[in-house]
Image (cartoon, rainbow, N blue to C red):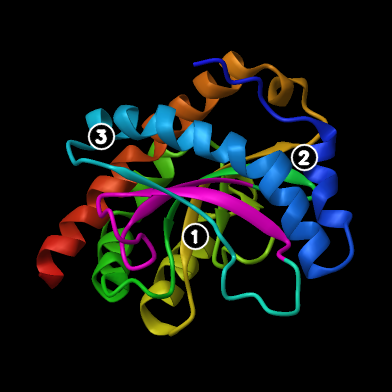
Amino acid sequence: MDFQGFEQKDFDVFTIEGLDPRMDALKERVRPKLEQLGEHLAPTLSTMTGDEMFPHVAKHARRKVNPPNDTWVAFANNKRGYKMLPHFQIGLFESHLFVWFAVIYEAPIKEGFSKQLLAQSNKVKDLIPDDYMWSGDHMKPDATKQSELDLTELESLFERLGNVKKAEILCGIHIDRHDPILSNGQALLKKIEETFKTVMPIYKMAQQSTMVVE
């Protein structure tokens, strides 16, 4: 695939004032690249997970006034949607590109997955590299490096997932918008695939929680 990576003007989209002008720029500059990533990486994720994975590029269709602060392509094993399922995301805020494994607030497995994470918290901490990020809210650009979380703090994130209705759990990487890897398409694809491979054990745990719910 002839993927060229991202440019500074892709991140500058989020400085454009107004819903329609920002959406026009997103559709023109960023969405084609997310569609490329979706098409290219869905088969890779299907092989990694053992499930057929489908890409879902954000359309922001429900927005009527406020322009989006981020955009993404998500991957899940359902053709119709991803929000209720454990899934993967690649996307942009103004400041960085993110690559996540995610269970967000719509997912019915949250309580069961929370218990699994708590029961295996030491294992999870060992599996995830210290420079990877954790977040409890996919709508906020901020996240915390694992190296800055002790086991108790990590477990409080896991516990919150099961106890708080809007709580979420995301694990993956941030790449600063000025990092040269973003403009090197092949190097970036390799980095994304490595990230998916690293967080895959947590996805498998989440899938076990899905089977329990079903």
Residue drawn at the location 34% of the way across and 61% of the way down? 81
Q: Nearer the viewer, residue 150 or 101?
A: 101
Callout 2: SS = helix
CA–CA distance between discs 1 and 3? 29 Å
Kindly identify which residue carries mark 3.
Answer: 46
- Left or right of 103 in this view: 3: right
The label nearer to you, 3 versus 2, is 2
Can residue 93 be seen?
Answer: no
Would you call the spot at circle 2 few (<14 residues within 10 Å), some (14-19), or many (20 or more)?
Answer: many
Q: Nearer the viewer, residue 195 or 87?
A: 87
Callout 3: SS = helix
Answer with the quarter of the image where residue 24 lies: bottom right
Kindly identify which residue carries mark 2.
Answer: 10
Q: Is residue 85 magenta?
A: yes
Q: Looking at the picture, how far across and down is residue 13, in whole percent?
A: 81, 49
Find out whether the residues at labels 1 and 3 contact each other: C-beta distance under 8 Å: no
Q: Looking at the picture, how far across and down is residue 51, in whole percent?
A: 19, 41
Callout 1: SS = helix
> What span is in magenta?
68-91
CA–CA distance between discs 3 and 2? 28 Å
CA–CA distance between discs 1 and 2? 33 Å
- Left or right of 119 in this view: 66: right
The three-letter code of the residue at mark 1 reads Leu
The three-letter code of the residue at mark 3 reads Ser
- Left or right of 121 in this view: 130: right
The label nearer to you, 1 versus 3, is 3
Residue drawn at the location 71% of the way across and 43% of the way down? 28
Of labels 1 and 2, earlier in sequence is 2
